[in-house]
Amino acid sequence: MKQFFGMSQSGKLEEALYGLNNPQFIMLLSNKDQFEAHVRALEKIYPKVPSIGCIGMSYASRIAEKGVGVIAFTDGVNASVNVLEQVSVMPVKYIRRMEEDIEKVKGTGRDTVCIDFCTGNDACALTTIHTALRKNNISLVGGTGDAGMVSVNGKVYQDAVAYALVKNLNGRVKTYKENIYHPYGNYRFIASNTDKARYIIGSLNGKPAKQVYESILHVTDQEILTRTFQNPFGKLNGNDTCIISIKEVAGNSLACFRQVNDSDVLILLELGDYKAIVKETIRKICEDFPQRSAVFSVNCLFRYMLFNERNYMQEYLQEMASLGSHAGFVGYGEHYNNRFVNQSMTCAVFE
């Protein structure tokens, strides 16, 4: 297979599509003002090509921050796209659609990946999707778009998750998750007084969450929102750690970008040597896949902001380009199989 990336900083879809021939699957990454028009226009240009889309920044060797980006697969994939609606209430109502699409592409864990764009309620959506994917050991990579809209085959949906089942006809596919954080100290917290609907942590070990965070790191209310780049929370998930970003201070509580439940065990994290970690991720991918046709990734908005702040974003894209054809988008939360994580990078590598 081959991966195409095109972009227009000014939002001209025709410019982003220049050079794209015979696509077999398309991902549209647009801006809030032009998204719906771009969705309609893309469907007119490629009416029989399966496509999904969302609002967000896209990148390859450069990043399209406000315009439009197009990522497409050609020459050797079989893709089926669809949508699960009412994602905030009952996405399982539509799970038969995914089960039928898995049967249609004849997907297996060796050669197929699910790519999804979600409008919200990610943890519930991923749990639902996993019930279908796990039967065939199919992995998932995706993320949350902006403004609560996604698209599938020329139609815009709200309160939904758009997905694509992509089968590599010429080899394997495997997913990866990169964590640039490690535990800070030996802190262990039991969360309580949480608000699942508002993603709020009220207390940690029986004390107000804000007070605990401030006293350990010696920061003020105003500094918490930027300090989360360096010191987010982590939720223990077996041998893995799911990163939890702080969104805002809510009284004596902390509102996050990911749901925390009463009795969840949390730890405090700190930023590691991210340049060395990126190089190790690349080394591991090259070891697993000596020959790569494409790498599709999702980077968190907070990673993008951190890398920009440290003048590393362009260097990062150049590092990833050493893998060959690398493209992706900036999400408001990253999906990895049945896990919803923050401040991470997830990717799918095609042989």
Image (cartoon, grey):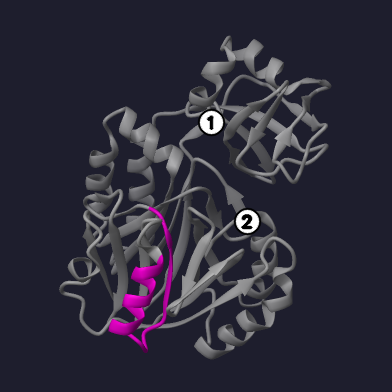
Q: Which residue is mark 1?
A: 182
Counting from the top left corner in percent of width and height, residue 196 is at 76, 44
Looking at the image, which is closer to me, 223 or 61?
A: 223
Counting from the top left corner in percent of width and height, residue 246 is at 59, 32
Residue 204 seen in render: yes
Mark 2–mark 1 distance (CA, rounded to whole Å):
24 Å
Amino acid type shown at disc 2? Asp
Direction from residue 318 to residue 188 in the image, left or right? right
154 relative to 158, above or below: below
Looking at the image, which is closer to me, 319 or 311?
A: 311
Task: Quadrant for residue 75, please give it.
Answer: bottom left
Task: Quadrant for residue 289, please give it.
Answer: bottom left
Check if residue 241 falls in the magenta segment.
no
Q: Secondary structure at mark 2?
A: helix
Name the residue at 67% across, 38% down. 235
Looking at the image, which is closer to me, 256 or 173?
A: 256
214 relative to 154, above or below: above
Amino acid type shown at disc 1? His
Image quadrant in which the N terminus is located:
bottom left
Counting from the top left corner in percent of width and height, residue 189 is at 75, 27
Name the residue at 57% across, 75% down. 83
Answer with mark 2 or mark 1, whichever residue precedes in sequence.
2
114 relative to 321, above or below: below
Circle number at residue 209:
none
Q: Secondary structure at mark 1?
A: strand
Counting from the top left corner in percent of width and height, residue 305 is at 38, 35
Direction from residue 309 to residue 113 in the image, left or right? right
Q: Which residue is mark 2?
A: 122
Name the residue at 26% across, 47% down. 317
Which is more foreground, mark 2 or mark 1?
Answer: 2
Label 1 crowding class (10 Å Cα cut-off): few <14, some 14-19, many 20+? some
Please report the bounds of the magenta region as a residue range: 36-56
